[in-house]
Amino acid sequence: MIKVNFTNALSEAVFEKYLGQVKDIHHMIHDKTGLGSDFLGWVEWPNTYDQAELAAMKQTAKQLANEIDVLLVIGIGGSYLGARAAIEMINGLYSQQKVKVIYLGNTMSSTYMAQVLQYLQNKKFGICVVSKSGTTTEPAIAFRLCKELLEKKEGFLKAAKLIVAITDKHKGALKTLADEAGYQTFVIPDDIGGRYSVLTPVGVFAMLVSGIDVDNVFKGAQQAYQDTLIDDLTNYAYKYAVGRYILNYEKKYKAEMLVTYELQMQMITEWWKQLFGESEGKDSKGLLPLSCIFSTDLHSLGQFIQEGTKNILFETVIEIKKPQLDLALTKAEQDIDGLNYLAGKTLHEVNITAIQGVIAAHIKVGHVPNIILEFETMDDKMFGYLSYWFMKACAMSAYLLKINPFDQPGVEIYKKNMFDLLGKN
């Protein structure tokens, strides 16, 4: 469901010397012998996920969706990005689904928080709070404020039935609170870190409330699992990882820009940035993950990409073969806007032509390497496929750099400084 084209980035010959490393790292991933191996639970997850828990989530999600107009998904980083990426990609930005989803706990902006609380005053809402510990500052603050509003509107007992906690199975502040208050809880697996958790209850519950067919999501992930069992470079996920490593390590590029031409896939690029940035950005190594939405950003950053400072970034372009929806362009009686030459074409055909034109300009004139990722579709099965595919590619890529793909020691520094400045004991 994903093909990788390096024609505009690297020659095939440069990949050959990495075959041995790819084979070794593949077995390191599946045998759990590498750095951070305690957090490789996601590798087998498409085949080993708890089906009884999924059935319980489906039932709870259906009941909750029937009672609310708005779902608050409270979490930060991997606790919300995957769910948002899935919901927006699959449902689109103007979904006809009954339940509107609002994301909180990913910022400490007072204005944003206050406006959301004001918006909720006359809305029937429920809460899905996602946190392993329950003490991460941003989501903890948002949950306290939203829980207080919900309890004020509905009463303590009714509010408890409208709150679902995705958290640790046994311990932590959120687990304790949930057990005391009687919230429905689902489990964040101990061996799967946040940015690799989208196919666990962390991402799945919100998808279910949003009307997404999660069975199809898992079918896509299962297909990606099978397609990435190959331990050589006919495995496109591994070839993508090796290609970006060559561009970074051998060609000295410092940044990778993931480009999509679909607005509803913007959060896919945000999820991808966390996945690769937090997994690889250690020991003064790794590519800086950037993203653009074309053709939108061609009218802002396009000039820099085309003619700006060279040898900084390369592009990885997502090309969708079959969109969810398409529009036919017709011929006007008076061609005042000069668009009659497009009559008979579809808008997606125009979009594909734009992709081809931009790639040609950036390669031939701008001399910016372009990797092309060909996606078959942008539906539920495709999301399951791409999420697993990118996680597998990321693990390979980080192990090529000889770093732990599953920790994030640098993130903890800002938290300590903030707590010290706020006077936390």
Image: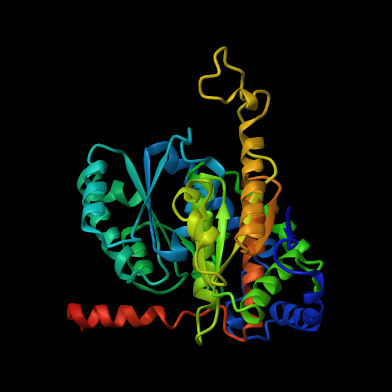
Query: How many badges with numbers are in the image?
Result: 0
Q: Is residue 425 left or right of residue 135?
A: left
Rendered residue at 38%/72% (across/down): 133
Locate the C terminus by quadrant. bottom left
Query: Residue 126: where, in percent of width, then height?
Result: 35, 47
Task: Specify whether 82 is left or right of 350.
Answer: left
Image position, residue 278 (x, y; %): 49, 74
- 359, above or below 209, in the image: below
With respect to residue 403, does 266 lie above or below? Answer: above
* Location of residue 110 by image quarter: bottom left
Residue furthest top in the image: 333
Q: Quadrant of residue 183?
A: bottom left
Instruction: Tell whether 142 sits left or right of 203.
Output: left
Give the percent coordinates (x, y) of residue 106.
35, 61
Inspect this view and state whether residue 104 appears: yes
Residue 189 seen: no
Identify which residue, 143 or 297, lies in the foreground.
297
Tell me how the rendering is colored.
rainbow
Given residues 407 and 53, the one toward you in this image is 407
Locate residue 91, reporting x and y percent: 53, 41
- Residue placed at 69% from the left, 67% from the top? 240
Task: Identify which residue is drawn at 51% across, 20% down.
Answer: 336
